[in-house]
Amino acid sequence: MNRTPQTNESCPSFSHLDPIRRRFPCLQQEIHGNPLVYLDSAATTQKPTQVLQAVESFYQEDCSNVHRGVHTLSERATIRYEAVRAKVAQFIHAPDPHGVIFTSGTTEAINLVARTIGRDRVSSGDQVLISTMEHHANIVPWQMLCEEQGAKLVIIPCTDDGDLILDDLQSLITDRTKVVSIGHVSNAVGTMHDIQNVIAVAREKGAITMIDSAQAISHLPIDVEQLGCDFLAFSAHKMYGPTGTGVLWGRKELLDQMSPWQGGGDMIRTVTFENSTFADVPWKFEAGTPHIAGVIGLGAAVDFIQEVGFETIQPHEQQLLEKTVTRLDQLDGLTIIGRPENRISVVSFVLDRIHPHDAGTIMDQQGVAIRAGHHCAMPLMSRFGVAATIRASFAIYNTLDDIDALVAAIESVQEVFN
Amino acid sequence: MNDIRELYQEMILDHSRSPRNFGPKEKHNLSAKGHNPLCGDDVEMHILRTTDGVLEDICFEGSGCAISTASASILTGVLKGRSEEAVREIFASFRQMVAGQGDVPAGEGLGKLAVFSGVRQYPARVKCATLAWHTLIQALSGVEEEVSTE
């Protein structure tokens, strides 16, 4: 079961990515005596040195609270923190940095929208539209809202291939539809949804549109102006940044109308025991001391992605995807779940008579890290008639050799069980 | 691969492929459901307990990984005919074997159940090995609520 050390000899076109891979310290290790092959980037990506250094340098050199105090450290911290807001706005082509709100992640961002404008706009008898393919983070907040308001959660169905069925969109979105919240890319099977179409129809009908871009942000360029959505959310940790930090981008005119989300320090203008007045957008939505180091790390992650460039990331990841699908299709006793028309480098599959968790344990012994489970998308698992799948997901640092290791690990699983 | 064979021993593979005492039984007086949200394993244990506290019959239903299925299957065989008190004692030893701290004798006195001693090396899989046990204890306690490993 020993694999030959990884080289790029078999694929000269990949050698230019070698320096990129070397920038990820966590990838330079062995697991159970085998080189780590990390195929779980859809859960969280590894972090390049520049992100780690940015986080560390905040604590080493500028550690202080933001928006408080006139001392030098606080000023530096505030400048670094607010600079990331502008950087993120530019990264997603948002017209105004004030539309960028820092959250703890995508989940908090969606909850913020559901608990503020969602609660204001959705009343008894109204509808919220999501799809079969959502992550639980884009299901449960809306389910809670609908339950509370007496509204109905309506679901866009999907095909056996894992594509959303959008033919009936005009009838799914009615004048009772107040919110349409759709994943940009499926975390379970990798589908890139035709969100442009969904947003256009929703806007026409006057619904608020929210896009969960957690799985898209590191794989494809995002332009919120071009998409035309009202809100868009993503997490830093799925784009080479730190955990515990994320972004909600919102249309400024909507954010201005929205009531605050959590109350506390930093989100107020004045406080008396009789009442409080609130800070402007975006600070109105950032109560308490934020994850300053995380936000600074997010800024470094944006720099990393922009340095590498989507013109390098996209073809590389598509090549990985194509090889994975081709090689997995050649294996007996393996079924790929979902064959969407357009997908990013995420592939889910099941093995005949072998539970994904058993496969995961055995593959880990080969140093191959995959995700085994329901991927926080239980309704989608039910739709496909499986309890769980094995998911291999790729990022810029993966190589074609990683796919050979994946295939060898799957074969060793089958060897144990057959 | 040798290491992994210590976890997936032949007896475990055999019971996971052809679980014993599997399927609904008409004659039982205690039941409980268990669920492992992490991997989606579901198990339902049915017990026929006599008035003097002996487990006359045990069977199970559900779906799960090889470890959880084999664990449920093997325990039904081992525990049949034992007293409730003995079952609780065996579970304590089993737990100690798969999840205990320090030097633990590898399944001493556990008979067939010692086949799960390899689980100890895989902390992420301890819940798979103990789901059926927790569910069984829940059934014996007569509590209706579903057991969760979380």
Image (tube, grey):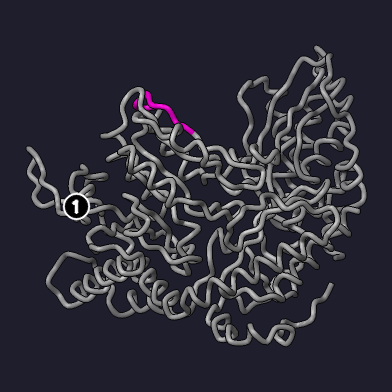
* Residue holding disc 1: A267
The residue positioned 53% from the left and 62% from the top of the image is A44
Q: Which residues are magenta?
A: A147-154
**Residue A408 higher or lower than A165, as above or below:** below
The residue positioned 58% from the left and 75% from the top of the image is A397
The residue positioned 37% from the left and 23% from the top of the image is A150
Q: Please say whether residue A150 is one of the residues in the magenta stretch.
A: yes
Q: Please say whether residue B74 is one of the residues in the magenta stretch.
A: no
Tell me if mark 1 has few (under 14), some (14-19) or many (20+) residues whose alpha carbon lies within 10 angstroms of its own.
many
**Residue A393 higher or lower than A27, as above or below:** above
State the residue lying farthest toward the top.
Answer: B51
**Residue A276 higher or lower than B23, as above or below:** below
The N terminus of chain A: image quadrant: bottom right
Front residue of A64/A261: it is A261
**Residue B143 higher or lower than A153, as above or below:** above
Q: Amino acid at mark 1?
A: Met
Front residue of A225/A4: it is A225
Front residue of B14/A112: it is A112
User: Residue A22, percent across and down?
Assistant: 57, 83
User: Residue A182, percent across and down?
Assistant: 45, 46
Does residue A132 show up? yes
Disc 1 is placed on an element classified as loop
